[in-house]
Image (cartoon, grey):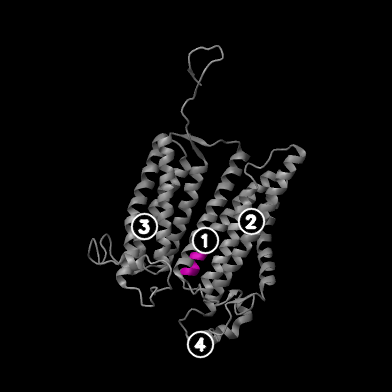
Amino acid sequence: MTNAQPLYDLAPVLELMLLGLVIALGPLTWVWARNRRSSPMRRLQALTVLTLFLTFDLVLFGAFTRLTDSGLGCPDWPGCYGSSSPVGARAEIAAAQEAMPTGPVTHGKAWIEMIHRYLATGVGVLIIMLTVSSWVQQRRARRDAVPAPPLSPWWPTVTLLWVCLQGAFGALTVTMKLFPAIVTLHLIGGLVLLALLCVQAVRHTQSAQGRAPVTLPPALRWALVVTGLLLAFQVVLGGWVSTNYAVLACTTFPTCQGSWWPAMDFAQGFQIWRKLGMLQDGSHISFAALTAIHYVHRLMAYVVLLALGLVAWRFHRRGVLPAQTRWLAGLALLQLVTGLSNVVLDWPLVAAVLHTGGAAALVVVLTWALVSSRAATAPREFSAPTGASRVSA
């Protein structure tokens, strides 16, 4: 029955859209109730921050969906066996579960998968509201000569387009049967979405509080940028480990399989476009390939942890960005502890979800630090109108 189910069944689209609107009404009502006497710009700031928070929760639930093997809990998209909920697909799910009790389709996994889709739809509605509100405020500022939003409305517009792309990758995750490259791109897309929303939340908050970015020495600012790039690369490697289920290729620390350099097949491990557990020629991926995937991520983790520690230490010494400093130090420690737990405790679900959550939080905090700071500029020189000697500006 599962094999006969079409991969795309758009019958429940309208019901799912309506459900997403209902889910979004809760946060929208909360923002309006708490800020009904505030300015429209203050409400926009509150909605942006809340949308960032709920998107972070969505990323966490997406990790939970993947780590509980619920990504194929409903084998079609966007609904579940053509229904808007597992309730309407009870018979199909029961048949699939009876045929394969530990398979990808069970009642529990179907609910986890559909709840993830419901939450994603709700977040999509919130981002639509952000986009509409930003353009309305921009138009109002031009018409009534009131302060304009601190960011161009194109920021939420690009964010909305990115959400649509994320939805497409979510569909491909199901219809391509957990293709590792697609699942990894879906994970990366969620983190990029967090970064886009974080930029907007920080800029709106700075505007509401009348704060300017903190000036950093150029070397420290560049260290922050490089650390962000290293983290981005490590996130990609971590996604590749998770989507290839390579966590348990090394179950000891600091060595792997009792060796500092175990047998590894990098060519197989980083063959990108292939099915889960397979190679492009149709053969099964080797254990040495999984080891290579795991060990590269582990080696890169040392570099990223060192970079995070150095940036946090230099921030602390200069007394700048104290909140971001504490978060960077705490999250780096969390990543170390949860990463080790995944290895030595046989990949416990809580540690695995927290490890993904820690990576997402680091993306948010580094984005927060970048938007909250700027590099100091060297004094410029100019010629005085009287022809006097050049002086510093």
* Distance of label 4 from label 3 (alpha carbons): 39 Å
Amino acid type assigned to the residue bearing label 1 in the image: Val
For marks 4 and 2, the one nearer the N-term is: 4
Tell me which residue sits at (46%, 40%) in the image. 322
Residue type indicated by callout 2: Ile
| Residues shaded magenta | 60-66
Separation of residues labelled 3 and 1 (CA atoms)? 20 Å
Q: CA distance from mark 1 to mark 4?
A: 31 Å
Residue 343 picture quarter: bottom left
Q: Are marks 3 and 1 in contact (CB under 8 Å)?
A: no
Looking at numbered disc 3 in the image, what kind of residue is underneath it?
Answer: Val
Q: Please indicate, yes or no, whether residue 345 appears anywhere in the rendered image.
A: no
Classify the position of the N terminus by image quarter.
bottom right
What residue is shown with label 2? 127
Sooner in the amino-acid sequence: mark 1 or mark 4: 1
| Residue pictured at 53% horizontal, 70% vertical | 172
Marker disc for residue 337? 3
